[in-house]
Amino acid sequence: MSFSQYHDATQAHGWNGLMAKKATPGPRKAPASSLTRGHKKKARTRQQLVDAALRIYARAGVGDLALNTLAEEAGVSNGTVYNYFRSREQVLEAVGLELAVQLSEQILTVSEAVDSGAERLSIAVRTFMNKARTDPDWTRALITVVRYAEGMRSTLATYLRADLQAGRRQGDFHYAHEEMAMSMVISATLGAMNLLVEDGEVEHADRIAAEMVLQALGVPPEKAKGIAGLPLPGEGG
């Protein structure tokens, strides 16, 4: 799925928009059994390269990824890498999409039945924070890649815009400038994730981060604390 398809799916329904799009009947596709061994092998190799790039970004940052280094990390030949990626920019875009898909699908799963924009935003922030707690290498890669991958930033902004607008319509959010509000939420969440990765465990970090973000968007303190303290869908009491 392309970034433009993600954008279309989320314009009206935030993190839930893509789920609705997935449920929309479309052209019939060939069954998985019809895929050739060659196609399956190509998909595996491409994923192997993306996973290797993630590890490099987590260790050394974007600037240190060369295609021959990627080949060595993935255990393939230089020629194999060039069959999939012609430049470092193409690798970066692929990794950005991978990260967006991984976390977006997780957020969509847990927030599918939630109508409140404030609650959906809280769920998203807490999901990001919990991912930082459980997978620091993935988080380091995300923090590195999001600075450079325009498509990934656009995807995150599209999800966020819809939830901000919903929260504003519902009377929970009060902000003076939408673009600044989006930038603030993304920057605050990434900063809080980085704190967990670099400085270790903070008790109830996900709830604290969500509560503070909600307050910054104009939600009264007690209400923000209540929303941030709700059990995540499927988590139980």
Image (cartoon, helix red, strand yellow):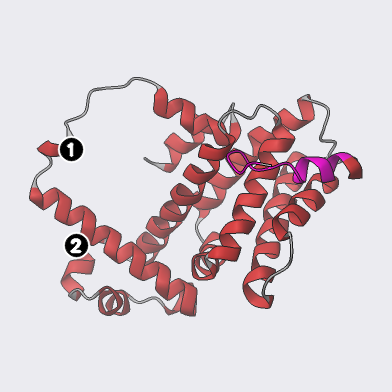
Per the image, the residue denoted by label 1 is: 32
Q: Where's residue 92, x and y in %?
A: 42, 62
Q: Where's residue 162, x and y in %?
A: 64, 33
Give the magenta-colored segment's residue range: 223-236
Q: Is mark 1 on a helix, strand or loop?
A: helix
Left or right position of 84 against 135:
left
Residue 55 lies in quadrant:
bottom left
Let me know if residue 213 is in the magenta part.
Answer: no
Please name the residue shown 61% across and 38% down the image: 233
Left or right position of 32 against 61:
left
Inspect the image, locate mark 2, and give the three-letter code of the amino acid beneath it. Answer: Asn
Mark 1 crowd level (few <14, some 14–19, many ≥20, 10 Å Cα): few
Left or right position of 130 against 68:
right
Residue 83 bears which disc, if any?
Answer: 2
Q: Where's residue 74, x and y in %?
A: 27, 73
Q: Where's residue 95, x and y in %?
A: 41, 59
Report whether residue 217 is seen. Answer: no
